[in-house]
Image: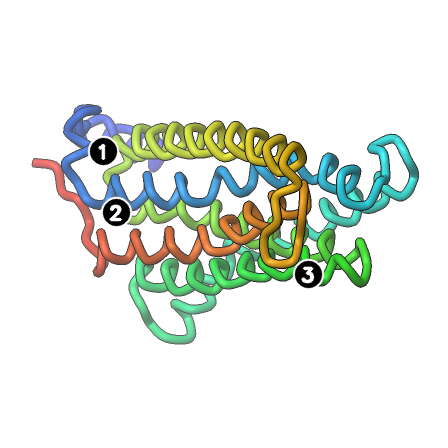
Amino acid sequence: SAREKAETEDSETPVIPFWRCFRYPQTWAVIFGKFMSDGVWWFFLFWIPAYISDVYGFASDTGTAQMLIFVLYALTMLSIYGGKLPTIIIEKTGLNPYAARMRAMLIFALFPLLAILAQPLGAYSYWWPVIIIGIACAAHQSWSANIYSVAGDMFPKSTIATIIGIGGMAGGVSSFLINFFSGRLFDYAAATNMQFMGFEGKPAGYFIIFCICGVSYLLGWVIMKALVPKYKIIEVK
C-alpha cells in the first residue's frame, strides 16, 4: 500500500546523529528562531495578569481583569490563518517553500513591534496594552507554526523530530531566562523607583521588557536569514 511504501522509504532514510545536527546552519536557524520568540510568548502568558494588577490595580479575580485576559486570548486565535500565508505567497509568486515561509515570518515579525507602544498607549486606556499584546501573541503563534515547517522544508523526515526537539529546548531556555530576569528587574524597579522613558517603578520595568519583546522576532528573523540565506535541503548520504 501507499502507506507501507512511505514507511519503507522513511525507514531507509539515514538518520543524522544528534550531535552532528549542530554542524548545519539550518539547525542553528531553528535554534535562534525559537530562542528569540518562545521566551516572549511565555513572558506574556506568565506576566500579563501581574501586569494588569501592578499597573492598573485589577486583581486577577476581578471581573475586569478576567475580561481583559479573555479578550487577549480571543485575539490570539487570529493566528488560525497564520500557517496558510506561505501557501498563498507560493501560489501568487512561485517562490520556493523556504523563501515563501521566510517572507511570511517577516510579516509576522513586524506585528510584535507594536508591543513597544503598549505602555505609552496604556496611559489612555488599559484596553490598548491588552489588544496590542493579543495581536503580538497571535503573530507569535503564526511565527511558531511556520518555524516548525522550516525544519520540515530542509531536513529529511528521519531528523525533523530531532530538530524540533532541539528548537524546543532553545525555546525553553529563553523562556526561563526572560521570566527569571524579568522578575528580578520588576523587583529592582519597584524597590528603587527606577525611571525609564517617562515611566517609574514597575511600569518602567515592564516597558523595558515590552521593548525587548517587540524587537525579538525581527532580530530572530534576521539571524535566521543570515544563517540560511537561500533554500537548501540537507541531503544525508
Decide which of tag 1 and tag 3 comes sooner along the chain: 1
- Viewed as shown, does residue 62 lie left or right of 26? right
Colouring mode (rainbow / by chain / secondary structure / one colour) = rainbow
Q: Residue furthest bottom?
A: 93
Q: Name the residue under label 1.
A: 9
Residue 43 locus on image (x, y percent): 58, 37
Question: Quick one: label 2 or label 3, which is nearer the N terminus?
Answer: 3
**Foreground of the two, 58 or 40:** 58
Residue picked out by circle 2: 154
Q: Quadrant of residue 118?
A: bottom right
| Residue 114, quarter of picture | bottom right
Residue at (38% x, 58% y) in the render: 101
Quadrant for the N terminus in the image: top left
Side of 122 relative to 227 (left or right): right
One can see residue 78 in this view: yes
Q: Which residue is labeled 3 in the image?
A: 120
Q: Element at badge 1?
A: helix
Taking the spot 30% from the left edge, 53% from the top edge, the residue there is: 223
